[in-house]
Image (cartoon, coloured by chain):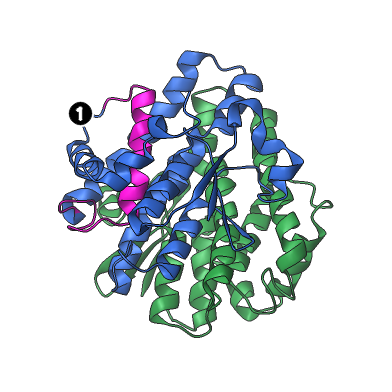
Chain colours: A blue, B green
Amino acid sequence: MRLYDYWRSSAAYRVRIALNLKGISYEQVPVNLRSGGQRTLDYTSKNPQGLVPTLEDGGAHLTQSLAIIEYLDETHPEPPLLPKEPLARAQVRAMAQLVACEIHPLNNLRVLQRLEHRLGLDEREISSWYRHWINEGFAALEARLKTTAGRYAFGDSVTLVDLCLVPQLYNARRYRCDLVPFPTICRVEEACQALPAFDAARPERQPDAA
Amino acid sequence: MRLYDYWRSSAAYRVRIALNLKGISYEQVPVNLRSGGQRTLDYTSKNPQGLVPTLEDGGAHLTQSLAIIEYLDETHPEPPLLPKEPLARAQVRAMAQLVACEIHPLNNLRVLQRLEHRLGLDEREISSWYRHWINEGFAALEARLKTTAGRYAFGDSVTLVDLCLVPQLYNARRYRCDLVPFPTICRVEEACQALPAFDAARPERQPDAA
């Protein structure tokens, strides 16, 4: 498999963790979001949205990190990233979507660039925007984790939730969010980071890291 | 089942279509987002994020529209809303997430309210923000549909993509987006709206419609 990747993309980071957990070897192709690599015709022919990641598997180009991870889970079932029972699956997916649909889309690069260049926000206002959506989302996630977390976010096995939580914390730290109100989130992160699959997926360990 | 709902919420609209397609009878409990019904303690005990929809099933409260729809699809398999083959499932999920993760989160009520009240944007600037994200997302979706669409968004059966596409078009029309560049999206919408399950889910047919 081939992963079109950017070291600091938290959506790509989720997929790197999944590939590592499944023990799938993959070639990384860096797409430099800072210099517009995602807008080249070559890349948009693979991913019309011009976003990372894209996973290439047998000639097919898969997009959207959560869809890619469910694909990997269906084609490489071990270790499973979703529980078996429908209600538990729905809870795991909802917690992952809390991060992927309610926090991350508001804080990704193209949005911050629009806030800066179109709406003229300064650095302080952009940081405040960023932290606001993380705080809102993490408060809800922390409340959920109090009833679902074991060693990891949902019981004692790694699930899709952990794959979203760890990259989002990386972003939160970049923007110096106060994480004191979120002890369960931080505890789960620590347990995840002790696993080699998470460690190898860290942004700073990627070949294109600045 | 009981659906905590708001007539104009496009996330709730997706779930209404799914329930109708599956032939599941449900009680609607309106949550008035305009008057803050989503922030009451009673509601946030069911949905800590204070977002709609929430689906109550046998005492459990399910959140996040895509997670709810996959739950309904797993517990009520007919008619299926996802294809059987992993690659096709990934494509359908990715197209649904294109709407649910890349368009809708940037345009929902809490975001527009923050743009207005915190950042002081006027009506013209907010409409421009709204249309920008719809245009970006619809351009990518239209490109995808050119290769995937049959009668509906992915072949000739209704899938999760259609459940996201139709409510997003409702929003696009509210903000008077130019839909001329998106003929495939509009053609698929027309096919969907001819189905009773979609028709009954329209915002203006809901009991709390203004």
Vertical placement of residue A35 versus A190, above or below: above
Q: Chain of mark 1?
A: A
Q: In the image, is B183 to the left or to the right of B96?
A: right
* Magenta extent: A149-178
Residue A151 lies within the magenta run: yes
Q: Tell me the quarter of the picture where residue A22 sits.
A: bottom left
The one of A161 and B186 positioned closer to us in this rendering: A161
Residue receiving disc 1: A180
Counting every numbered tag in the picture gives: 1
Identify which amino acid the numbered label 1 is placed on: Val
- How far across and down, in percent of the image, does residue A16 sit? 42, 47
Q: In the image, is A166 to the left or to the right of B118?
A: left
**Residue B106 visible, this orientation:** yes
- How far across and down, in percent of the image, does residue B18 sit? 51, 73
- How far across and down, in percent of the image, does residue A123 sit? 50, 14
Vertical placement of residue B31 versus A51, above or below: below
The one of A53 and B149 positioned closer to us in this rendering: A53
